[in-house]
Image (spheres, rainbow, N blue to C red):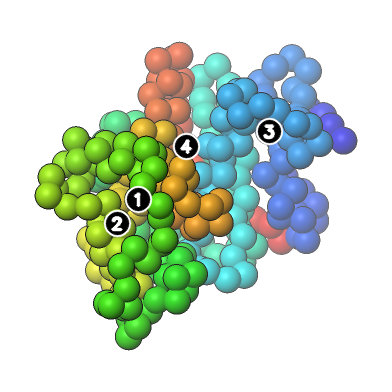
Amino acid sequence: MAISVQTPVFDEAMFANQIHAFSLLDFHADIEMQSVNYAANAYGPDTTISKHLSLLDGLALLLIKSPKSEVVATTMRLTSESFILYWARNDNQASQAEQQYMNLLRKYAEEQTPATEILPHVVDYTKRKIVSRCQKLAKHYELNQQNQKLDVQNIMNVDTRTLKYHQLEEQLKQRRIIKPDRRLVDYLDKFIRAIARVNAQAKTQNLAKIIGQAFELCTKVHKLESLVDREQNDKFRKLSDYLYAISHFQKEVSRLSSKGIREIRFEQVWSN
């Protein structure tokens, strides 16, 4: 079902029990002011629409603090002069600190601050959710703070005989992520054990480091997915997504600026 509107109107009753629907709306400054229900259509991974959805999903991720019962939906309005991100959350809670966080993301994006410098701010804001994702990943390998399986090698059970394994190991050594005299399996074992030690008191710098390492393992250059099954890869990707979302937003803001967009802002919409 396609939705067509004349102006981006947000009806409180409409979103009271349908916050997920918010992320299906996309307002354009075209003559017909048509909006598209993305969920009703199938698009390839490299289309403009799929990239748009990736951006909105990423920004929603950067706004989720709680590991349970929290939903954030985003949509946007793009005109010839402005980019406005609308966001709503199911608990309708907003604070001055939250508004400052959103403005900080916008400011850093406009200044093209390196994503790794923004990551600590995102970690501080979304810490509970990140800790939950770390604990879920560790649980998959039956690891926790007490049970580190120090007597077990190659916890992920990757096949070290394959060409893909050696290619990934060499790539990480060339990037100086792994020391020349270390093995990839040892690196992965140490990484997973570090994730298993994460708890609510985890330091920001340690969580940022874990996300950075997960990002390296899941990028287009370094593909952990060639060594593990989809379920394992998805758990690492869910950590890497934080850095990917920041980087993607940076690139999008740069692209918009090059096209003459002079105003970028975030606005919260109340869902009930």
Amino acid at circle 3:
Asp
What separation in Å lies between label 1 and label 4 (alpha carbons)? 48 Å
Amino acid type, callout 4: Arg
Mark 1 residue type: Thr
Task: List the residue tagged with mark 4.
Answer: 265
Disc 1 packing (10 Å; few <14; some 14–19; many ≥20): some
Q: Where does label 2 land, which residue?
A: 185
Q: Determine the CA span between mark 2 and mark 1.
A: 8 Å
Looking at the image, which is closer to me, 243 or 120? 243
Would you identify the image quadrant in which residue 144 lies?
bottom left
| Earlier-in-chain disc, 2 versus 4 | 2
Mark 1 vs mark 3: give the one in front.
1
Looking at the picture, how far across and down is residue 1, in whole percent? 87, 35
Residue density around tag 3, few if under 14, some if 14–19, many if 20 or more, within 10 Å: many
- Please, what secondary structure does the residue beneath circle 2 have? helix
Which of the two discs, 4 and 3, sits closer to the camera?
3
In the rendered structure, are the residues bearing label 2 and label 1 in contact, judged by CB atoms less than 8 Å apart? yes
Categorize mark 2 by other alpha carbons within 10 Å: few (<14), some (14-19), many (20+). Answer: some
The tag on residue 160 is 1
Q: Earlier in the sequence, mark 2 or mark 3?
A: 3
Q: Is residue 257 above or below residue 205?
A: above
Secondary structure at badge 3 equals loop
User: How many marks overall?
Assistant: 4
Disc 2 from disc 3: Cα separation: 45 Å
Q: Position of residue 4 (x, y in %)?
A: 82, 29
What residue did someone put label 3 on?
A: 26
